[in-house]
Amino acid sequence: MIYRGFKICNKWSRVNILLYFIFLFSSLQAQSQYLPQSHSNVSSNDAVILMYHNVSNVSSPLTSVRPEIFKQHINYLVDNNFNVWPLSKVLNYLESARSLPPKTVVITFDDAYASVYNEAFPVLRAKGLPFTVFVTTQYIGDANQNFMSWNQLRELQKMGAEIGNHSHSHAHLIRKHKNETQKQWKYRVTNEINQAQFILEREVSTPIRVFAYPYGEFSNSLKEILRDSGYIGLGQHSGVLSRTSDFQAIARFPMATGYDEINDFAMKIITRDLPVTILSPVDGVLLNQHKLPELKLQLLSGDYNKSAFACYATRQGRAIVSWENFDKGIVNITAKENLTAGRSKFNCTAPSNSEKNVYYWFSFLWMKPEPDGRWYQE
């Protein structure tokens, strides 16, 4: 398992739950239905991480899947022979350059909602599947019925679940307070993360040293804090984990009502990591309100059709793709219009050359304040 001693390798160079998968998958669903048995010889260097919040019929659909849908997901994984591994095991394999088995999937939950204990845990326990819960420590232990208790978290851990850090207060960590210096911000955020880890180490046995960013938001400065403190970081932007991933900004596929139907689910869990180098910008925090955001990538070699590379911008549809140097894989992606305030993504895909209905995927997260400079409200 991956605990405090997990080695972070700096060589790994390289969140709005509602992506709009609809722009990508609406065309795919017109094709013949995915057949899982046709993808047995998949890459052994990729793992798909699934991210859930609530498993409930009554909580907000923006952060929930219905219990019956969750059962469909789990049954699909089991019935089609996917390898569901603990997060720490997958990270250790990739860090040590060992090959993962085909069709590797990781199940994670953010916030430690009570519905995870009441609805998801019985399903996972019955199938003997591992999973990880990322805990916002301030929410636990104050008789808040929406979240698990420490005793329930300890029970999950005894049954094989891993417990990780989701901050102490679930603050927007990329944001500075009024008149706060960079040094003061760094000190406050470091304490926020370390306080949560201290509480986890006091309340549960050996929590993993993996941090799930609140709201999936991260900046280059926040990633540096995690790297310097020896944490791996997980976002909420869609994508696949591989050896070439940025281990302070690991992508996960968010599961939410409207984007969790079984056909979409089946496509996501066979997605591959699109190998890219981000040339610019250094992160997705947009402080210039009047400029169209542009993402510059270099696509690396892989088993995908570069000519069919396409990107989609949240709430806008297909983005503008301009090849600066096709042979070298250097490409510029621009939104058709200014992004709205909040979190947006550029989701880029390319079809596999060798496997039908399999797509390589890369996602980039943008975070944009309101026009007057105030940060958006949740």
Image (cartoon, rainbow, N blue to C red):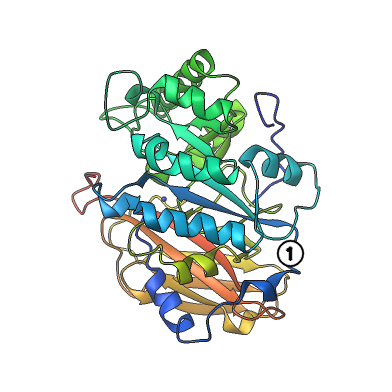
Q: Which residue lies furthest to the bottom in this view?
A: 31
Q: Residue furthest top?
A: 202
Camera-nearest residue between 279 and 164: 164
Crowd band around label 1 with a 10 angstrom C-alpha radius: few (<14), some (14–19), many (20+): some
Left or right side of 375 for 309? right
Camera-nearest residue between 7 and 141: 141
Which quadrant would the C terminus be assigned to in this image?
A: top left
Left or right side of 61 for 323? right
Q: Is residue 307 above or below residue 284?
A: below
Q: State how many labels appear.
A: 1
What residue is shown at x 74% (from left), y 64% (from top)? 43
Q: Which residue lies furthest to the left in this view?
A: 372
Residue type marked 1:
Ser
Q: Is residue 56 above or below residue 334?
A: above
Left or right side of 220 for 344? left
Instruction: Find numbered disc 1 in the image and state the secondary structure of the residue it sits on.
Output: loop
Which corner quadrant of the image does residue 117 belong to?
A: top left
What residue is shown at x 51% (from left), y 52% (from top)? 50
Q: Where is residue 76 in the image (x, y as percent from the top left)?
A: 54, 61
Q: Position of residue 225 (x, y in %)?
A: 53, 31
Q: Can residue 50 be seen in this view?
A: yes
Which quadrant would the N terminus be assigned to in this image?
A: top right
Q: Which residue, given by chain and number where applicable, does mark 1 sit on?
A: 43
Q: In this view, does 338 lie above or below 282?
A: below
Which corner quadrant of the image does residue 54 belong to?
A: top left
Q: Position of residue 279 (x, y in %)?
A: 58, 60
Camera-nearest residue between 45 and 278: 45
Q: Can residue 286 be seen in this view?
A: no
